[in-house]
Image (cartoon, coloured by chain):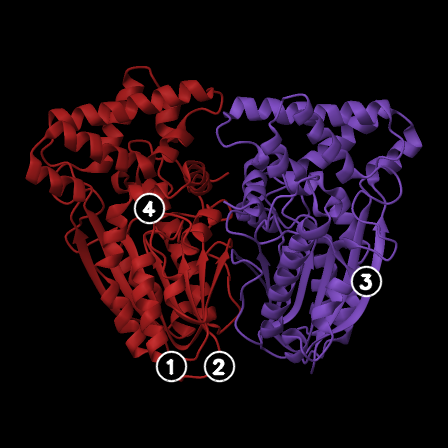
Chain colours: A red, B purple
Amino acid sequence: MSNAETTATFMAMKGSGYYSKATAGARDTINQATHLVLEAIARLTLADGQAPLRVADFGAADGGTSVDMWRSALMDLRRRAPRRPIEICYTDLPRNDFAQLFRMIHGQTEIDSYYKQIDNLYVFASGTSFHDAIFPPRTLHLGFSATASHYLSRTPRTISNHVHMVGASGAERDAYIDQGRIDWEAMLSARSRELCEGARLCLFNFGIDEAGRYLGSTGGVSMFDTFNELWRGLADDGIITPEEYVNTNFPQCYRTIDQFVAPLTGSSSPVYRAGLRLEHIETRVVRCPYARDFEQHGDAKKFAQSYVPTLRSWSEPTFSAGLAPSRVPAERQEIIDEFYSRYERLVAAHPRGHAMDYVHVYMTCAMLA
Amino acid sequence: MSNAETTATFMAMKGSGYYSKATAGARDTINQATHLVLEAIARLTLADGQAPLRVADFGAADGGTSVDMWRSALMDLRRRAPRRPIEICYTDLPRNDFAQLFRMIHGQTEIDSYYKQIDNLYVFASGTSFHDAIFPPRTLHLGFSATASHYLSRTPRTISNHVHMVGASGAERDAYIDQGRIDWEAMLSARSRELCEGARLCLFNFGIDEAGRYLGSTGGVSMFDTFNELWRGLADDGIITPEEYVNTNFPQCYRTIDQFVAPLTGSSSPVYRAGLRLEHIETRVVRCPYARDFEQHGDAKKFAQSYVPTLRSWSEPTFSAGLAPSRVPAERQEIIDEFYSRYERLVAAHPRGHAMDYVHVYMTCAMLA
């Protein structure tokens, strides 16, 4: 089981909208860029008629973070093409909590669904990786993906001095960049086969911006450096082994703007040759909602108690996967609890500068008409 | 939460292909009638080309019971239209274990998937009830549904003297027959809107055959009567209350051939007017695999220990749902365990005549071309 699958399993286990609730910031990063999707829709050539329109949300998890964006986008599509059936498909890895997704869509959760607000709408899911073909050729009118492409299809190697590629160097860093390039090209290549002529693809991903900033590293205390220091501290204290420290690596690549854009430029790129073009790109920093609250209330303990669980919600599978398979569940739980407890104590004692600010690269691509 | 949803939740909890493994007989009822699907495919008008073909499995659970049938059917479709993309969509209620379904399709379970054997194939799921519209109008080329339509969208009322409508009479039986008619018409009506001209719909359902036989009631000991007698025995012994006995009703309707056929005949039927026609109907009894094994080995205890868990796999949610909500989980578990333990002891002591023989009504319908 890959680390990416471990994450999916973890999320499936937590279930019941855990992912969405713990990721209010991820929803904010989508909602604040909804206009980019609406502008992409405005540029679509959409004749009214009977032929279905197909849209997709790639790597959608339980659909909670994008539901408000899709409500706006689907209403816009409905206005543009009043009589056309609309098919929306949510994709993720097989172990994703698709039942939670469908329960959300059909109004069986606390989340407000758009399903009954838009007529002639049909909702589907796919469990096929977005590195592969998901739809038949030329059947997709609008693609969207947020905060999913940083997960690699495989962990290329261990990192000796850090838990994340942002802290790696030399051949170790290159291995992650290379896998990141392969996966990004595969994702864009699969989409360029599926998109109709003139279709649009909106991609909102974690990345490294012009100023070198990335998730949790925007000038204050670096979140991934803190993860690394605390995890190494467990090794120094004999709580985990040196092998476990080295084996703990986020299966992620944060790409620079140049790396995001590369497959979309230059006639030697298969994606470019297939007709996919970059239409718009920008970077945005969305301030960590917990750090923003702390600026108001100033209560370091309260900040630590709300901030660290959010970090835990998405990072725990990586740290758990780094532990030796021989460790029994109770032992694993104890180590993981100690790890996040140290993080919480650190933030409570020295709150200044801690923040999981989101750094996203927002891209819109167009298929040649 | 409806009883049908309780079932889905139960199956989701058991997970990991539990449904399919416990329902070898359900798979047999499909596999033995695969030729009906292949004959329906042979009658389709299929030009080759680029336009996707769409097929669907309605009420598919985890997809395990129909996987062999679909392998044959999809290979046939691929031969008939070598270049056309094929989309297959599995539908069930939102709480269904869709993750298990996708893991099966993508070869992550012990079940042999067809996914890599058929090129240009795209797999999807829908969590929309098959009593509602699932696909845009005129986009479905082949529909299939097995052993799902006996579940009602709601339990119409309690039954005073039995746990299943097959043992009910008068107004109590009529209420189930009426809800069964409403749901069957809704299902066929939704499909008649979705099917393309000349498309086929294969429906293999539990029913009551020409000789009055139905699931577990084919001349020997009646399974539903045994359920009823043992459950009433718990009430007689004060283990459950009289209210709990009355509140325990399978949310199911077993239909007669006339009831299955009614919406497909007569110009006053909306389904008939929409162009859906009955092309073929037959009934079949598939012998209970556990009773057949018992005929060979003659070991009553072994028979009881393999037979009763199969019954439990699909009936437990109904008995559990009949218990008062105030009962705590441990108490519920104790009652349910006692119930099936009594069934097992009964079969071990008097094995003759016990058998969950499957009685299916197999129909093929065609949309007017």
Q: What residue sits right under mark 2 in the picture?
A: A50
Q: Residues within 10 Å of mark 3 (few under 14, many from 20)?
A: some
Q: What residue sits right under mark 3 in the picture?
A: B35
Mark 4 to mark 1 CA distance (whole Å) = 32 Å
Decide if residue B134 is on the left or right side of residue B67: left
Looking at the rendered structure, whether the residues under marks 3 and 2 are on a common chain is answered as no
Mark identifier at residue A326: none
Q: Does the residue at mark 3 contact the one at mark 1 (Cβ under 8 Å)?
A: no
Front in this rendered view, residue A57 or B299: B299
Mark 3 to mark 4 CA distance (whole Å) = 46 Å
Q: Residues within 10 Å of mark 1 (few under 14, many from 20)?
A: some
Q: Does the residue at mark 2 contact the one at mark 4 (Cβ under 8 Å)?
A: no
Mark 3 to mark 2 CA distance (whole Å) = 34 Å
Residue B148 visible in this rendered orientation of the protein: no
Decide if residue B326 is on the left or right side of residue B276: left
Please, which chain is the residue tagged with disc 3 on? B
The spot of residue B23 in percent (x, y) is: 72, 42
Q: What residue sits right under mark 1 in the picture?
A: A46
Q: What residue sits right under mark 4 in the picture?
A: A20
Please, which chain is the residue tagged with disc 1 on? A
The mark that comes first in sequence, 2 or 4, is 4
Mark 3 to mark 1 CA distance (whole Å) = 43 Å
